[in-house]
Each structure stands twice: as structure tokens, then as C-alpha cells.
Amino acid sequence: MDTTTLTKNMEAVSTQPVKVCARDVKVFYGAKRALHGVNVDVYQNEVLALIGPSGCGKSTFLRTLNRMNDTIDICRVEGKILLDGEDIYDPKLDVVQLRARVGMVFQKPNPFPKSIYDNITYGPKLHGLATRKDEFDEIVERSLKRAGLWNEVKDRLQEPGTGLSGGQQQRLCIARAVAVSPEVILMDEPCSALDPIATAHIEELIDELRESFTIAIVTHNMQQAARVSQRTAFFHLGDLVEVGNTEEIFTNPRDERTQGYITGRYG
Amino acid sequence: MTEIAEPMQAAAPVSASFHTGNAAMKRLRSRYAAERRFKIYGILAISFACIMLVILLFTLLKGGVSAFWQTEMRLEVTLDAAIIDPQGTGNPADWDRGALQTLANNAIYKEFPEVEGRVEKRDLRGLISPVAGVFISKILDKDPSLVGQTVQVWIPTSDGVNQILKGGIDRTLPEAQRPISDKQLAWVDKMEASGHLKTAFNSTFFTSSDSNYPELAGLFGAAIGTLLTMSVTLLVSLPVGVAAAVYLEEFAPKNKLTDLIEVNINNLAAVPSIVFGLLGLAVFLNFFGMPRSAPLVGGLVLGLLVMPTIIIASRAALKGVPPSIREAALGMGASRLQAITHHVLPLAMPGIMTGTIIGMAHAVGETAPLLMIGMNAFVTQAPTSLFDSSSVLPVQIFIWADKPERGFVELTSAAILVLLAFLITMNGAAIWLRKKFERRW
Amino acid sequence: MSATFTVGLLLLLSLVGYVMGRSRAVTVAGGSIATLHSVPNYYGSYVALWAGLPALVLMLFWMALRGPVMDWLVLDGLSQQQIQGWAQVMLPPNDLQNLLSNIADETAALTETHRQLLLINIKNLAGGQALYVNPAVVESIQPAADHLRNLRNLSDWTLFGAVAAISGGALAFCWARISPTFRARNNVERVVTWLLILCSTIAVFTTIGIVLSLLFESIRFFTKVPLTEFLFGLHWSPQTAIRADQVGSSGSFGAIPLFTGTLLIAFIAMVVAAPVGLMSAIYLSEYAPRRVRSLVKPVLEILAGVPTVVYGFFAILTVAPFIRDLGAVFGIPISSQSALAAGVVMGVMIVPFVSSLADDVINAVPQSLRDGSLGLGATKSETIKQVVIPAALPGIVGALLLAVSRAIGETMIVVMAAGLQAYLTLNPLESVTTVTVQIKSILVGDQEFDSAKTLSVFALGLMLFIVTLVLNVVALRIVQKYREKYD
């Protein structure tokens, strides 16, 4: 990892405060090292896109940000990740609370086999965000509106979430994440299983969500990264190659690996 | 790296996020308490299962291990030729074997010459087995020249004495609750003090068949019965089961009929075993007139019983062989049957064998259907053919479990230990096979 | 001449056929095997199959049918005097009276029960087991016994001759057909395919056999006892008088007490097995460290492999006395054959069954659902309770239904630990009896042919079969649907 490159990148920061700060993050699966020390900051109310060829470690990195890697037995994380200056790998820190603050949307839409209504209220119920029926109703309506799904499903809230189309399911999953009122939302290739129209919906949605949340999104699709993100990080073989303003990365990459990737020489 | 790490921008003020507030922290604590409780339920469930197994094994070991030993009494038996061989032919076939018991009784009277009277003498001979004559008879069969001599013989004690000496029954119990009286106890103590008593390995348990007397009862007949029955079961269920699996997996077209067969097999695997017993009774015994209690019928019934298991396991094993193997063989000009017999079946064999062993282990322990076809016969001789009356191990256990004598409680536990050892070996073999031949494609 | 010889002959001829067929193939090929349509082994197999199979089929049919046919022939050959002579010794006065009047009317003389008794006497005499036969009747039935012995001899010899002829003939015919262009492989494979089909239908025939045998005898039972009394009657005591003149019990066949007893014990078993089995499956698949899992799995496997007769012994030796003594401590009288003891032990037996089925079902729930829930900040137990279990619910229900079916059909534990008397109660501390206990206790022991008591067993068996069949079909359907959902 070239420190100077990073420092240069860090200069091009927004005026927003840092929300998530990763320092020298290394991830091991058993004896195999998947990330070789990643340094990156995510600023409040921005969309950071993580791009790179398959197996480069971008999803792995994303999952370290809300400790979803804890569910994998052989996975080990080194380094420091700070959320609002607080180390999220501190043994004293509570992982359940962390995940309430850092929500996640997965690659494949995974609505629970429950009604649409229950899918949304699942998180708020867990965290005690509401107690009365009307409060829940309001959360459901607000979340679904934010996810741009309200008009499509408002008449069938009691139908199972698994009955929706793929794009709707993914928006339901976003609404489900939003309903918990997290501070950060992580999205792991949220559009890879969707058709172009559904993808466009979601991309629009991400742009709107930026006003209230900090978002990190992993994507395979470079156009998508260009469209939705303010800054982009390029990963290659477990290294963070470079990070910077999206426009700059796509028009004037500093590293030839980045250039090779965005011009489609490999991927 | 430090230059970046240090001048971190001032963190955003800890937002008024609901998730970090006091209420949320309190809530979190109670959620974690629920988490702990749930986990404890899981641990309790596991512990319950484990404890039950431990109690089961402990009771069996505690009650059963002693059955492998038998106390014996050394007596000087006068093998009076006039009594044993009244016709004087010298031919063992003409011996009066019923009289041997009298000789054993006489021998113990001789040890206690002071004992007089009918009742007293009855109590005295109650110390040794009422079937002691059978043991003397066995000795004579080995060495007929002993007739006419006086020999030292170790004779099994009666069940009561055996239990008291081995500690199976507490000797400090009140007289009325003990199988032997105070007087008998005193005689036993005297014999023990003079070195007339010893505890020997109970070889009878492994060499003889059922008997009304615990000291003469053994597992041999039932073991042979199990062996014969299982041979029939295996011969019936393995070829037919594998053939059915091969047809259903490799040849059968997907239609209503094969669907029916498939549903059928799955259901048959879950039909209560006693129903198979009724089938055996109605069809094999009543309709075809096959002999009752015979290993042949038992084997057939159990064969039908385990066939679904074998079919299901074989199909899973066949499914596990990748299609590329079949295609490769067909591409070489082999017929479909050749591809299967030469290539697919050998590869599926470990899986088929594992399923078969598990099915057979199940059959070995099966009792209820065999009771329906009369395999609970009282059989004192090991069967010599598939048509003889016979018992099997689990049925023998069932029969002994019903008997009130203390000695049979012990024998039941011991027989269960033998059966379990057998089953665990079989299952162990299945696991070993699975591990050894496990193949990932 | 026993069947063993005939089987031996058959095997020998097949073997000879194989060798001859193979060598003829080599001969007709004239030194170049390549001119043959199939490899020589197939010609051998071809001859062997045809030398063996048709004769084998004949033999099986023969063996199956000779019993009933010979019974009929032997009885037909008995004269009225002989029957009367036998009946005067063996039958109670009333039955004898009936028999004599029947003979006078020239209607069917013997009832089914007496027919069986007479046949057993004849067979014992013919089989050289005269000590089981009342010496007073030997004179009357000796001719029949001789007749039977002759018939058996005749049958065996005829069979031997027929098998030898068919097998030998087929051998010669097939052997003669062998030529280089003869498609031996296709022929053999066709036969083998048919054999495979036959084998796969044996399962169907087994089911048909079960249904027919149960149905046939049940119908006979229901001609004696009305179906409504059986299904709705509240009193079960199957002791019918063996002789019409015997004083006392006339049987009653109301099976409701058996059904409630069965369900009570199955319910207690499920109360133990369902929570313990499910929680151990959940703990093992979601929480347990690998080391614990590798330790506990074999424990469950051993519990699953313990024969039920052992559980029964465990129940009477340990659990029932323990429960009784425990009740005594609190001053509650508990029967030593209480439904509770049998149910608890049956529950322990079913735990591994539930656990392994539930384990499969829970593992089939996709990880993505768990991730989704954990990603929202749910704890593990919240995820399990609110996402995994609801998602797995159909599968779990299916597994529990299979377990119920198992509990209802279980025999040995209840035979050993539950009672014999059919009390109509739902109190788990009292002794109840079950369907399987009654089947076992009626059939094991002295059987009377054709009595309502013996036949009732098949009606009970039919009920058992129907109930477990419905449970199994429903459960398997649910589980299958569930699997498809996540596949």
C-alpha cells in the first residue's frame, strides 16, 4: 500500500465529518489472507462505492464494517475500524447495537417469509423503536415511502414479502434496513440479481437515501458506481489500490491497475 | 500510516441515535438475558439426552456385568457307577442322567454330615443349582472314564446364593426379603471360609440356550437364531433393494407409476414394524403355511422391513455418482446396463453398504414383528436350520425381562450389553466405511 | 426329497448352462471372438438365466400353493366316520352336537376353527410328532396322515421332475439357439431389466399385501362385531368364551379406551421429545462449537440405535420405579405401569429421531435469511425464534408428525411398560393400554382360530396402519414441499 497515494487521496475529501474510519484492516480466512491492510474513510452523508474484480476483497471489507464476518467461524479481523471514533472491534462494544447502527442490504434479496408489514416492523420491534400499533404503522409507511415501494404495496401489506418481484423484494429489504434508523447502510451488490429497470429504481433510491444516511456500496457495475457514488475505492487482490472522488477515479486514475480495470482490460 | 491515523477529523458528535441511548442499553441487557436463557434451554436439551444415555448405560452395566461371573462350589462328587449306569452297558446313551442331580445333592450332604431331616436337607441342597446334574453330565461327556470315581467338581450355586455372594442382593436384608434363609447363609459362610466357593467366568452364558434356570441360561441359541434370521434378511433385502434402487434411479421413466412406487417406498419406511409382523402372520404363516418361529419367516419379514431403508440409501448413493461417469462409459460403446454394473454400482457401493449396515443394525434390534410370528418360543437348543424353532437376541431379552428371578434381571442386562456391543460395532463399521470412502465430486 | 435338493438342482443346471453356453459361443465363433455379436459371457448368462428363471418361478408357485391344496385334498379324503371319530374325542359336547347335525344335513361339517385343529393333528401325525396328538384320535386320522405324507412325497417328486424337465429343456433350447449373430447381450439385458422392474414393485406388493391381509381379516371381524361398536364402544375386553357352554365373559370390542391410551402415551412422548429434540437440533446446528457437536452427535446416534426392547427394559427397571417412588414421596399413588413412565421413555427414544429430522430442516433454511436478520441487529436467539423457526415451520411440523406416527406405532416399550387392562382415562399416572399392546398380547399366547378375539387384532392393525399412513403421507408431503421451496 502506497502511503503517499493515500495521503493524496485523503486531501480530496469532502467537508463532512468522518463517519467510518478503517485503519490497516486485515482479514484472514483460516490461514489465507483476504485483505492486506486497508485504510479508508467514509464521510457522513456520502455514497462510497467499492469496486474491483471478483475476489478482490471488497465484499469482505464491507462485511467487516458491521462485523457480519463474525458469523463465519474461521474468519479473523485485524486492524482498527472506528464508527464515530469508537472502535467497533472493541470487545466491550456490542455487536447487536453496532448492527442496528450499521444496517446492511445483501446481494440477493432476502425478505423474511413473513408479511410485508412484518418484514418492516421486524427490526423496530427488536430494538423497541415503537410500542403502539399506530407508531408501527407510521414506521412502515415512512420506510416504504423512502424505499419508493409504498405506492406499489400499500394495499397488500399483509401479503408475504416473498411474493414480490425481485426488484420490489430488494427495495423491501432496503425499507427494512431503513426502518431501524441506522446511521450507516452497507449495500453488497444490491442490484446484481435485478433487471435494468429495477436497478434504475434502486439507484435513484440510493441517491435519495444519501441525505439521511451514510452509504457504502459494493458494485460490479462501474456505470453504477459512477452514477450513485461521490467517492470510489478500487480494490485489487486484497489491496485497496486507490480511493478518491468518483469523477477523478473514472477520468484520471492514478494507478494503472485502476485504469486497466475501468477500461475493461480485466474484470 | 501514523500521519493519517492521528489527525483524524473530529468525530461527528455522537448522534442522538436511538440505538446508543440509555433506554436502548437497558433493552439490550434484557435481550441478552433472553439470548442466554435460550442458549441454556439448548444446553439443557442436549444434557437431557446425554444424561439419559449415561443413566441407561450405567444401569445396564451395573446390573449386567456381574452376569458374566458365576459363583461355583467345590464338591466331592462320587460318580457311583451303579447309579449312573444301572444297566452296566458302559454306553453313555444308556446313562441315567436324571440321577446325576442326586449325586450332586449327595455330595453337598457329605459336606454337612450334621444336617438331618427332610426339610433341612432340602434347604441344604438349595445352596447348589437345581440343575447341577446338567453340569456333571457335561463333565462326564468329556471324560466318560470318570464313572465310578470320586472327583472334585466345581458346581454352580443356586441363583439365591449366587446373587448374595456377588452382592446383587444385600445380605443384611431381613430374612423374609432374601432368597436364602439365615441358616443357609451360615452354611454359605462356612463353605466360603473353607475355600469351597469361587467366582468363575460364566461361560455357560455364551454356550448354552434358553433355560428356566438362570445359571443354565445362555445366549448361544438366540445368537445363532439372529445369525440365521439376519442371513435371510440380508439375502432378501440387499439384492432386491439394490435392484429396485437401480431401476428407479437409472431406468425408470418419470410417470405416475414410478411416482406411486416412490411414495410407496417412503411410506413403507415409516409403517410401524408390528404391522409387518401382522403381514408375516397373515401371509407367510396362515396363507403359505410356513412354520412358526422359524428364522426363515423372521428373515423374510425383517427383509421386507429393511428393504425401504436400503432402497432409499442406495438411491442416494447412486444419485451421488456424477453423470459424467455414465456418459463416459456410454461413450465407449457400453450398454446402459454395462455402464451401471461396471462403473456406477462399484462407485456407489460404499454408500449402499453403509445404508445396508444401518438397516441391518435396525433389523437386529427389532422385536415386535418377530413376536407376531411366534419367535418368542421357549427354545433350549440352538436352531440348526432355517425351519427350526428359534429365538433371536432381542426376543430373548424380552423373554428374560419378563422373568421374576433376580438372576434373569442380571442376564437381561448382560444380554442387552452384548446386543448393544454388537450394534455399536455395526454402526461403527458403517461410520468407518462412510469416512473411508467419502468422495467429493 | 426336500426343497433343498430341488434348489440345488436348479443352481447346478444354471451353472452348467453358463459353462455350456459360453463354450458353445466360443466354438461357433470359430476362433475369432470378434465375429460374435456379444462377448461369450453373455451367451453363458443367457443360457443360465433361462435355465434357472422359469423353473424357479414354477417352484415358487408350487411351494406357495401346495399347502392349501394339500389341506383340501387331505380333508376331502376323510370319511364321515373318521371325522366323527376325531370329533368325539376332541370337541366339547355342544360343538359335537352341532357337527353331528351338520353332517346329518350334509352341510359343511367343520367350522373353520375345528378344521384348523384337525389339520394340525393330521400334520403333527404326518410329521412324526405323534406326541403332540391325543392318542385316542390317532386311529381315526392315521389314514389322513398317511395320505398327507404320500401327497407330500408325490408333490416333492413331481416338483423335482418338473423343475428338472423345464430347466433342462430350456437349457437345451437356448444352447441350440446360440450362433454368432444371436444377440445374447440384448436378450440378457432385457431379462435383467424386467427383473429390476419386478424388484422395484416388491415395495408396492408389500403394501398391497399389508392392506389385503389386514382388510380381509378385518372384514371377517366386522361380520362378528359391528364397526360402530369397534370405533365408538367404550369398553374393551376381548375375552370371548372359547366354548359356548363356558360361563362368564363374552367379549366386548369397543376400541375407544385403546385409542385414548395410545394417544395419551404418544402425547406424553411428544411432550418430552418435541422440545428436547428441537432444542438440541437448534443448539447443535446454530450454537454448538464443533467439538461439542462431534461429541453429542454420536450420543444421539447411539440413542437412536438402541433397540426398543432395551428402552422397554429401561422403563420397567429404572424409570417406572423412579416415578412411582417420586410419587410416593409426595403422597401421590402412581401405578407402576403408569402411562407417564412409558411415555417418558418413548419420548427419550424419539428425541434423536426428532432432532435429526429437525436438524435437516433447519439447515435447509438459507443462510441469507439469517444474515438478513443479524444484519438488522437481531441477536442469535431472536433470529432463530423469529426468522429461522417460522421459515422452517412446515418442515418442523412434518418432522413432528412423523415422530407422532412413530410413537403411535411403537410396540415394545408399551408392551413392557404399559398396562394390559383397557381403562378409559386421561390421567397419566394411571395405567392405560394401547393398540399395539393389545395386538401383541392377543396374538402371543394361545390363539383361537376364527374367534372375534384373534380377528380383532387385524382390525386394530388396520386402524394403526391407516392412521400412521395418513400421518406419514401428510408429513412427507409437507416436508417435500418445504424442501422444494428452498432448493
Image: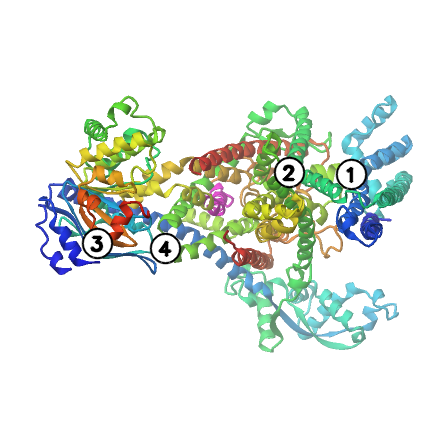
Say which residue label 3 marks.
A89
Say which residue label 2 marks.
C203
Which quadrant, please, contains the N terminus of chain B? bottom left
Q: CA distance from mark 4 to mark 3?
A: 22 Å
Q: CA distance from mark 3 to mark 2?
A: 59 Å
| C80 versus B59 height, above or below | above
The answer as to whether the residues below labels 3 and 2 share one chain is no
* Magenta range: C332-354
Q: Secondary structure at mark 1?
A: helix
The answer as to whether the residues below labels 4 and 1 share one chain is yes
| Camera-side mark, 3 or 2 | 3
Say which residue label 1 marks.
C64
Q: CA distance from mark 2 to mark 1?
A: 19 Å
Mark earlier in primary sequence (2, 1): 1
Q: Secondary structure at mark 4?
A: loop
Say which residue label 4 marks.
C289
| B406 versus B95 height, above or below | above
Taken as a whole, is the magenta stretch helix, strand or loop?
A: helix
| Camera-side mark, 3 or 1 | 3
At label 2, which amino acid type do we have? Ala
Does residue C466 appear left or right of residue B128 in this picture?
left
Q: Residues within 10 Å of mark 1 (few under 14, many from 20)?
A: some
Q: Residues within 10 Å of mark 2 (few under 14, many from 20)?
A: many
Q: CA distance from mark 4 to mark 2?
A: 42 Å
When asked about the image quadrant of residue A37, the answer is bottom left
Asked if residue C352 can be seen in this view, the reply is yes
At label 4, which amino acid type do we have? Pro
- Residue at coordinates 43% horizontally, 51% vertically from top-left? B49
